[in-house]
Image: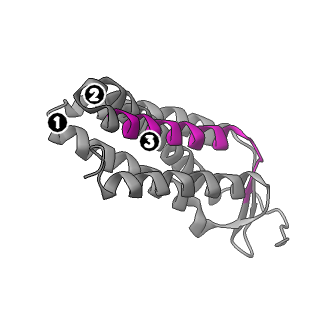
Amino acid sequence: MFYNLNLLHLAVFLGAMACVHLARREVRGRPMSRGRLFMLPALATLIALILLLFHLADGDPLWTFGAAFAGGMAGGAVRGATMKLQVDQTWLLMRPSGSSALVWVTLALALAVGLEIGGAIAGPDGHAFRFIGAEGAAVCAGLLLGRAFAFAARLWRAPHVELRRM
């Protein structure tokens, strides 16, 4: 351990950077396969679960993380249900509207990871920052997962739009 950090902190940091990269790819407006729909939310949820395990080991209550995740899921489902979505039913491609809100959510996830790492470096005095970071990561993961589930529910009844790979 180096400054109260371990390898999971490095993995969480790299995962947050990968989330930002995946979000930037999706916002560009290029068609993507349906299989890539859950890649970003799965990675964000894995990050939130790792941070949750850090705090369960410290004795923090589980219900606060569950409430934050559920609130994020509700907000993400509303966002996913109201976004413009184009679907190519022939080639199984989809193109969500190029909204920059997705990048902001992943940047907030990266900030939450930064709070966790900074709180770990600070030691026992940084527990509040670590707790806020873990809660923020749970909200961001819930937002991304709720958005993906809403998209998945809309894919099957969406009208066909001719999309081509660019």
Q: Inspect the magenta stretch and tell me whether residue 118 lies in it.
A: yes
Residue placed under numbered mark 1 in the picture: 58
**Magenta segment, prevailing SS (helix, strand or loop):** helix
- Tell me the magenta residue range: 95-119
State the CA–CA distance, disc 1 to disc 2: 9 Å
N-terminal of the two: label 3 or label 2?
A: 3
Type of amino acid under label 1: Asp
Q: Marks 3/2: CA distance?
A: 13 Å
Number of callouts: 3
Q: Secondary structure at mark 2?
A: helix
| Residue 113: mark in rendering | 3
Q: Which residue is mark 2?
A: 127
Disc 1, SS: loop
Q: Amino acid at mark 2?
A: His
Quadrant in the picture for the C terminus: bottom right
Would residue 123 be found to the left or right of residue 24 on screen?
Answer: left
